[in-house]
Image (cartoon, rainbow, N blue to C red):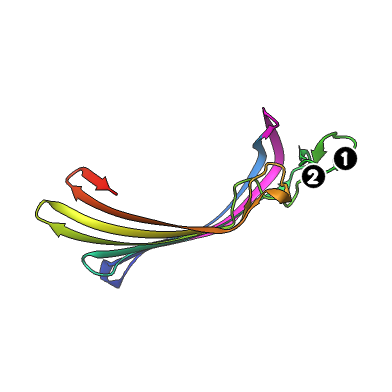
Amino acid sequence: FKSLQLDGRMLLAGALFATDYDDYQDAAFVGAQFTVGNAEKVELRGAELDGQIALSSSLLGDFAISYADLQYARYTRGMCYPGRPPDSPDSPGSCVLDGERPNNAPKLKVHAGLQYQKVISVGALFIRGDWSWSSEYNTSFSADPRLMQDAYSWVNLQVGYRWKDFELIV
């Protein structure tokens, strides 16, 4: 959905999504060698909401939140992380990764930003601050629990000048 609110000063947009992948190719490095695995089924379920609001003629805020649950519904020949024994003698070196999440796939991400702009005779000066947060996620192709990236936040601050198609940011 997309919606204008507050006499057009606020834009809201949202989406629900569900996607099923059959024969999902999962790329990985085994030592220094690149390999591609094949997960039989991967499911993605989620929702997104984002918006912008003009708090005044000079002050603009924006936000976004995304929930994306991506996981292997069936992956019987996934990579085993070091120290994990294979799950089946029929498939040496393979582990069942059903219910695990592909690498670099956090479930939740949040963002909020605020920008102040002052128009002057030769362009515009602005200052912008952004905060973002990501939930934890696995950085390993083999779902190694030792390679979890903890949840984290980061902050950006920009000061800049705009003139026509030129922008200088510090």
Dot 1 falls on a residue whose secondary structure is: loop
Q: Which residue, given by chain and number where applicable, does mark 1 sit on?
A: 88
Part of the protein shown in magenta: 29-48
Going from N to C along the chain, the mark reached first, 2 or 1, is 1
Dot 2 falls on a residue whose secondary structure is: loop
Residue drawn 28% across the image and 58% down it: 127
Residue drawn 78% across the image and 38% down it: 77
39 or 136: which is nearer to us?
Answer: 136
Residue drawn 21% across the image and 43% down it: 166
* The magenta stretch spans residue 51: no
Tell me where residue 142 appears, x and y as whole percent.
Answer: 72, 42
Type of amino acid at the residue the image marks with label 1: Ser
Q: Are marks 2 and 1 in contact (CB under 8 Å)?
A: yes
Find the residue positioned furthest to the bottom. Answer: 6
Q: From the image, which quarter does the N terminus lie in? A: bottom left
Type of amino acid at the residue the image marks with label 2: Val
The image shows residue 50, relative to residue 138, as above or below, that is below
Find the residue positioned furthest to the left. Answer: 121
Tell me where residue 84 appears, x and y as whole percent.
Answer: 82, 44
Q: Which residue, given by chain and number where applicable, does mark 2 sit on?
A: 96
For the question of whether residue 134 can be seen, the reply is: no
Asked if residue 63 lies left or right of residue 136, the reply is left
Tell me where residue 117 appears, x and y as whole percent.
Answer: 22, 60
Per the model, the C-alpha gap separating discs 2 and 1 is: 8 Å
* The magenta stretch spans residue 39: yes
